[in-house]
Image: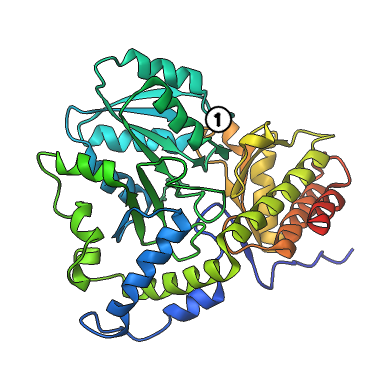
Amino acid sequence: MPQKPNLSSGVGYLAIPGPSVMPEAVLNAMHRPAPNIYAGELPEMMPGIVADLKRVARTDGEVALYIANGHGVWEAALSNVIGPGDKVLVPSTGHFGQGWAGIARGLGAEAQVIDFGKAAGMDMAQIADALMADTAHQIKAVLAVHVDTSSSVRNDIAALRATLDDVGHPALLMADCIASLGCDVFEMDAWGVDVMVTACQKGLMVPPGMGFVFFNDKAAEMRAAMPRVSEYWDWTRRANPQDFYQYWDGTAPTHHVYGLRTALDMIHAEGIEAVWARHATLARAIWAACDAWATKGSLRVNIADPGQRSHAVTALRLEAPQATALRDWTAQQVGLTLGIGLGMAAPGDPAWHGFFRLGHMGHVNGHMIMGLLGGIEAGFKALGIAHGGGALSAAAEVIGGA
Ligand SMILES: *Cc1c(COP(=O)(O)O)cnc(C)c1O
């Protein structure tokens, strides 16, 4: 029998949950000689970028810009409002909640973690109990991950605000929207979020390297009451610069700024609400396919309740070691790179090979999602992995019926 041809040449799809697929227009905008950082186009672009970032976050508050990834803005945000000996409450629904708590501890804070596991959203009653037990109001901030990219749970941030208000607790509400911004519906001001952190390499479609901290007046007051804040992390001047170098506290990430300008143009040309609707429909197509596959064999969506699932990322379970075998096959044979099962089991543990994730954040459309699902189904067939039928047709119905 002739050898089977390899089918991976062509445009690949990096379907990992960040960095996401970068639009050609963004990459092309970055391909240029170094711009002047003292005068001209680059400094002149900044006020528009700041305004357009706030439009994505749905806030009239302030935004500080950093050359940093998500971990960097975790620290930047906390550094402005949390110091040694302070206390924070972390309702954790996966790897990233634990990660933010770790950054807080590194800054000398006490992090009280409520661990809700890796397969469901926050339970507001338990959070209310923890807040009510804090009669002296020692908890200065609640650190909430909107979409935990490891479990793919989407938490109800508006309900968390209501929980704080109901028990009359004054803690700041800080949200990590690194995975969700520009994918899942997020309304900073309407939901009463005091501080929001995000980074540029997921829904914002720019190569990794910039992070953003949004904050409101209440958070600015807490910053003003801090005995000291690292000059580099201080958000005050970055959000109110008198000069271009103050936006980034030093040399700007020149080429990234051009990429971001183009990405924001694309988001606002489509319209943020249309961007949310696109992600919602594409996510439903993925879930419809997964439901069909799950009628036979071991594939399961990690988050059982569709109301708690992110529209940016989907974590899946598939009997070990099949998840790893599937990822290897799709990458090598059809040019489709699926995400690892981050934080669900320790690397080295055989269970590690029983999880994978689909990134569907940012620059993704209907045919890419159909290709993603088709590539997975081809892998099931090649590897003899048991699965129910009708998945592609179920997904096509969602996309066709949208
Ligand atoms: C990606 C991600 C992070 C970490 O961002 P890095 O840029 O990798 O440091 C933190 N939180 C969430 C929810 C994420 O998705």
Q: Is residue 241 above or below residue 30?
A: above
Name the side, left or right, on which 195 lies relative to 220: right
**Mark 1, residue position:** 121
Quadrant where the C terminus sits is bottom right
Q: Position of residue 296 (x, y in %)?
A: 84, 34
* Residue at the image point whose x is 17% and y is 32% from the top: 84
Quarter location, residue 136: top left
How many numbered callouts?
1
Classify the position of the N terminus by image quarter.
Answer: bottom right
Q: How is the image coloured?
A: rainbow
In the image, what residue occupies the spot 23% across and 84% down?
A: 39
* Rendering coords of residue 156 (x, y %): 53, 35
Residue in view at x 87 percent, y 52 percent: 393
Please indicate whether residue 282 sits to the left or right of residue 16 in the image. right
Of residue 378 and residue 271, the one placed in the foreground of this image is 271
Q: What secondary structure is found at the residue carrying circle 1?
A: loop
Residue 73 coordinates in the image, percent (x, y): 32, 50
In this rendering, would 105 be left or right of 380?
Answer: left
Q: Going by the image, does 41 lie left or right of 357? A: left
Residue furthest left as drawn: 227
Front residue of 254 and 215: 215
Is 395 drawn above or below residue 165 in the view shown? below
Q: Is residue 226 visible?
A: yes
The percent coordinates of residue 233 (x first, y second) are 21, 52
Does any portion of residue 347 appear in the rendered image? no
Instruction: Report the residue at 37% width, 55% height from top.
Output: 60
Q: Is residue 238 above or below residue 71?
A: below
Q: Amino acid at mark 1?
A: Gly
